Image (cartoon, coloured by chain):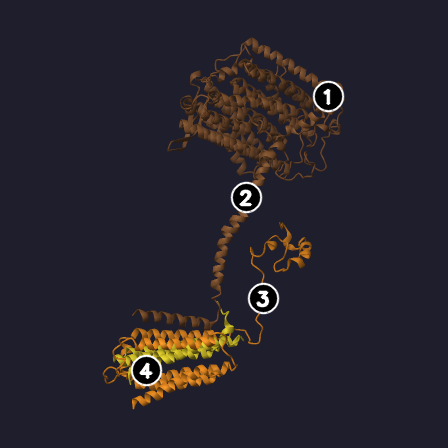
Amino acid sequence: MSATTAAWLVLLCPLLGTIVIGLGYRIWPGRSAGWIATLAIALSFVFSVIAFAKLLGFSPDHRTLTSTLWDYDVSAGVDAKVQVLVDPLSVFMILVVSGVSTLIHLYSVTYLTLDRGFSRYFSYLNFFVFSMLLLVLAGNFVLLIVGWAFVGAASYLLISFWYRRTTATRAGIKAFVINVVGDVGLVIATFILFQHTGTVQFLGVFGDVPRTFAHNGIAIDVAALLLLVGAFAKSAQVPLHTWLPDAMEGPTPVSALIHAATMVTAGVYLIARTHVIFEWAPTAADVGAIGGCLTLVVAATVALVQVDIKRVIAYSTMSQIGYMIMGVCLGAYSAGLFHLMTHAFFKALLFMGAGSVIGAMAGNQSLDRMGGFRRVLPFTFACFIIGGLALSGMPPFSGWLSKDDIIAFVDHRGGVFVILGIIGYGGALLTGIYTFRMIFRTFFGEPVPEAVELEHGHLHHADVPTNPMTGEEEDTDVGFPGPGHFIAEREWPMKIAMGTLAVLAIIGGVIQIPGVDDGITKFLAPTFADSKYAHVEVGTGSAWLGLVIGALIAVAGIFIAFRIWIARPGTAAALRERFAAVYTFLWHKWYFDELIDLLIVRPTLWTGRMVDSVLERGLIQGVLTGGTTGAVGALSAAVRRGQTGFLRYYAALMIVCVGGVALYFLIAS
Amino acid sequence: MSAVLFFIAAIGAISGAIGVVMLRNPFYSVLSLAFHLVSLAALFLLLRAEFVAAAQVIVYAGAVMVLYVFVVAYVGGGEQLSSGGVLRVLGPLFALGLVIELCIAMLGAGLKGVNSKGAPFIPGFGTPAHIGSLFLTKFLLPFEVASILLLAAAVGAVVLARRRRGLEPDEQIELRIEAPRPAWTGTMAEAAGLRGPGQEGLAASDAEAVTTAADSSNREGGW
Amino acid sequence: MNIGWYLVVSALIFSIGAGGVLIRRNPLVILLCLELMLNGANLALVAFARMWGNEDGQIFALIVMVVAAAEVTVGLGLVVAIYRRRLPIDVDGLNELQG
């Protein structure tokens, strides 16, 4: 089996899973749909490993393989084929995606037990994994766009999975609409590239860019900026980020998979894949880096005041992806992708832990109502600590190595970018604070009633299920969450998934320790061989300096959080009162939602209403159709008056007409 | 001699015609037409169309007019109907225009022979023998078609005038039929189970319809 | 007599019939006036037959009589049907007959 065959099989397994589960959703008994789905993704992971192994069998210069299944649209200058590109970058991505997806599928089998939409969920989830794998394996822009769009669709389907919740459906629509904005950017960028280079295949385009575009010229800048729009929409960067917190309406495993580990990293992948374009258009790359940096800060500050546990983690995701985008825009490809990998591990772990806590709380997600779960949820607590330490960048966890890898590179670029680096360290401080705020509030302090119940061995179940955001009553029938609540301590699939991720979060960093091994950099080197930063290396000394600073900042952040929330209980309330204006500003998420509403939503609605009343009713219905129908009606009314039914009038008419004809002939002869 | 006969017959025909139009009682109109037909037969004889004249008297005046008499006796129609409106004036005007036009057409056409007494007389012109032989040779098809036409007319008359089964003249025709509608038809409200078939009137019966819909048999799954 | 005279008489009868159709309201009488028109045409046909010495005109006149008989039959059947339905025997009132 060759690497490319393995790649096709990687794509085939989840696709088959979707179809099999989706078509037979009524016949799969019990939870077998979940096991089928998990098996499909596990097979996909196995094939990814095979592809990886086979790829290593080639010498580093030859590790770029393509394979075409069939020609989709090859004619008249277009060469869109169904082809995959198997090179270190795509193999790296499929390993991460399929690996984390397997664990999340395993977790979901338990988490969604008793939900009436169980089979539908797994069909959607497999479809999502298929789309994501398609996106990263695509060998040309057309297939990339297909995967991009499918991923957006899968995200919509899964966010509004509990479709009878109005909040969920609205969130799904919001996510989809903002994603579409990104899609438009991506498509137009593809077109600009195609127009200049004449091909849509990646290898062709990247080879031709230096020849057909002027360095830092308008065309390439516009193309790169549009690619950036696509990346920002998918990765929830400012200003196209407002959909991500709302997307937490979906089930927790969905948040773990899509909105932490995989879909939101698609933007990072895109920029890494098209690095040639961004290096040829430094203006756009700088814009991207600044955007990423801005997001990092905005998201970290907003996460400080969030009350919903999932939204804290969502903003944290946004912030970490800001790091990644900043990294890949400035040339730190392997660092950015390394952070992508470790982030997938510890973020998915955090989400899974949050799911466990939410299960203990019988669906409630508010930090205000949590506390003291440390003793009754020991495993979950341990996972949270591991994930939180990794996120904050505490040695020796993986997040420490990856995050500081990025910041070190940014600093190394020098010049203006040092400011971005400093902001990165500031963000790391905030990361520590908000992460441990969440952990302290959930697990420390007086046990809340649900925790007390659990101490007595009884898992709390609410009498009337309610929407955690709005409090309105629901039921547990199809379209709403099922009646089951599960915690990791009791369910072995959840334990296995979380345990694996915890181990990976701890040891995942060992493959890229500065000065020791540079596993990821070396592996990805063939893909980025044509990058002008390929030989830029942060010296081991400065790398370790950065790591030490990062560690100190992490400790500082944790300590601050400890001071505020544990050491002196009233500090949090006091600070909030002192900085009430800042608090309100952050509480409203920097007013982005209101801004978008004012600038975009309202004008659009106004235009729509105006067009409806003036154009549609006045012009089209009134004049065009109304006028035409009115004219026809008047004409037929006139003709109708001749249809009297009076025989004698008809006879008179006949006689007159016959006489007229005869007269004509008389005169004419 | 023939001129005198012509004038008598012509005046008879025209006065019969005027009588048909002007007489109020339809019965008198029928009789007037019969008189007109007989005068016309005389004119035909003057034109040496013996068979046509005979057919005119026997068939037309004899059978058709008798039929008319029967129908007029059955129907009656002795009411005084005055012609309405504008046609009372325009009708005669149109007729006048028509006759003038026809006369101009016929007389001013310059046909040779209009001023003559006709073609040289062939013995046997207009006799049944000649007519019969023409019918059976040159005009065979029109002959057969005419008989089919008569058949159709007879059947049509029977169909038109027959008594519908069970319909007595003094029975009120049932204008609204209450029949259960077949499946998949009817109003949306019936389909939704909110109303039974045939229930009319939203405002009045809506109140009870909603409350009774809960326990009426077609409410299950009504949505 | 000149054939022309016969033609004049035929025209007169025809137009009197036409006028009658327009003036009268009783359908029976209208049918009678239709007969008048047909007779006028018959007379013209026979006159022309005499003019040309050709009996085709007389054959035509016979066929016209057949048609007239058929038409009278159907028309009277209609009148009887209308009378049976208790509708007014008045052409102006029968202006919604259809189908």
Give the mark, 1 or 2, whose residue is nearer the N terminus: 1
Return the x and y of residue A303 as percentages of the image width and height. Answer: 65, 25
Q: Indicate the chain coloured orange by its letter.
A: B
Return the residue at label 4. C6
Lateral position of residue A153 relative to residue B139, left or right = right
| Label 1 with label 2: CB-CB less than 8 Å | no
- As measured in the structure, the alpha-carbon distance from the residue carrying label 1 to the one carrying label 4 is 129 Å
Q: Which mark is residue A611?
A: 2
Closer to the eye: label 2 or 3: 2
- As measured in the structure, the alpha-carbon distance from the residue carrying label 4 to the one carrying label 2 is 78 Å
Return the residue at label 3. B176
| Label 2 with label 3: CB-CB less than 8 Å | no
Judge by depth and name the residue closer to the eye, C50 or A313.
C50
Outermost residue toward the bottom in this view? B1
- As measured in the structure, the alpha-carbon distance from the residue carrying label 1 to the one carrying label 3 is 83 Å
Q: Indicate the chain coloured yellow by its letter.
A: C
Return the residue at label 1. A565
Q: Secondary structure at mark 2?
A: helix
Mark 3 — on which chain does it sit?
A: B
Outermost residue toward the top in this view? A541
